[in-house]
Amino acid sequence: MSDITVLMPVYNGASYLGDAIESILAQTEAGFEFIIIDDGSADASVAIADSYSRKDPRIRLVRDGMNRGIAARLNEGLALASGEYIARMDQDDVSLPGRFAAQRSHLDANPDTALVGSRVIVIDPDGDELMEMGDALSHAEIDGGLMRGAGQLVYHPSVMFRRQAALAIGGYDATYRGVEDLDFFLRLAERGRIENLAQPLLKYREHLNKAGATRLLDQEREIDAAIAAARVRRGMTGAQGATERKRRTPVSKAATFRKWGWWALEGGRQRTALKHALRSLAHDPFHHETARLFYCALRDSARPAARAAERKA
């Protein structure tokens, strides 16, 4: 029996599932069980997962043809898990090879830590890197920020947590359909420390079909509800506290491509920035921000060539 169980719910994830599975199988910490739970996929996800499970005995594929939601599937996985530590994984992300070894070592050395995540490398739908994110590392930074509704301070597929701590708080709350991770983090933070490692250990994929893009308004309402419930549990005055936070609103494809382009520029990935500038240009050619991104991407793409020419001269 391994002391690490990997939990990965899958729903119509065929596009990236192979990469996600292979990144787990390539971990330097090879002793783990890998539970993949299909949530009623209608694409090739089950066939892909089954092909890997036939080749690697660490993989256990669970399927019943029903669609129950991610929180219910994670609770199912917790009940099946044998590991002391639970490593989360999503169907569209990529774990870096040393992830499990680093997180297991941190949990072994810090018995008061209930959960540890990491900084991440954000990638686009093509797998091209945009920039590194996740600068909140300490428990105080993370918990305080989550209570303020400050955004994604812990990346769910990057975390490893203690199974007994998760069971002690009742696992995931399936009434949250879009922010089950936020509610889980807040309740777990009331039992132990939650932290992030400074080393990026996951490539976190952005794409147009993520829940944050398709269910944004529902997620915003659930964020308020999760924070309000945490305030009540903690005996804070009233259930308010997230009302002043900056709320997200639905954006166009062009705006999403611009966001990815600016992230890529900030991360020093000029060619990727130019790619997304061109995609934004195709969807919204007359928006002033599209033109500005395109100009900045071209300008910054030319700089390395200019520096190379100077060195040759």
Image (cartoon, grey):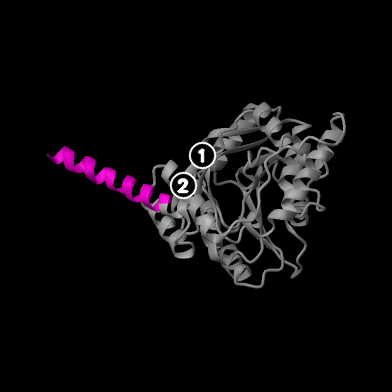
Q: Which residue is mark 1?
A: 200
For image coordinates 82% across by 53% down, the residue present is: 175
Up the image or down, 76 lies above or below 109; here it is below
The stretch drawn in magenta includes residue 309: yes
Magenta span: chief secondary structure? helix
**Which mark sits nearer the N-terminus, 2 or 1?**
1
User: Is 279 placed left or right of 210 in the picture?
Assistant: left
Count of marks placed on residues: 2
Q: Looking at the rendering, which quadrant does residue 237 occupy?
A: top right
**Residue type, mark 1 in image:** Pro
Q: Is residue 185 visible?
A: yes
For image coordinates 51% across by 59% down, the residue present is: 254
Of 229 and 105, nearer the camera is 229
Q: Residues within 10 Å of mark 2 (few under 14, many from 20)?
A: many
Residue 247, image x and y in percent? 68, 45
Of 36 and 269, nearer the camera is 269
- For the residues labelled 2 and 1, the Cα–Cα distance comes to 20 Å
For image coordinates 73% across by 49% down, the residue present is: 220
For image coordinates 78% across by 32% down, the residue present is: 191
Q: Which residue is mark 2?
A: 262
Q: Are marks 2 and 1 in contact (CB under 8 Å)?
A: no
Of 313 and 75, nearer the camera is 313
User: Is 311 placed left or right of 261 in the picture?
Assistant: left
Q: Which residues are magenta?
A: 292-313
Residue 130, image x and y in percent? 46, 48
Of 6 and 311, nearer the camera is 311
**Residue type, mark 2 in image:** Trp
Quarter in which the C terminus is drawn: top left
Report helix, strand or loop for mark 2.
Answer: helix
Up the image or down, 85 lies above or below 112; here it is below
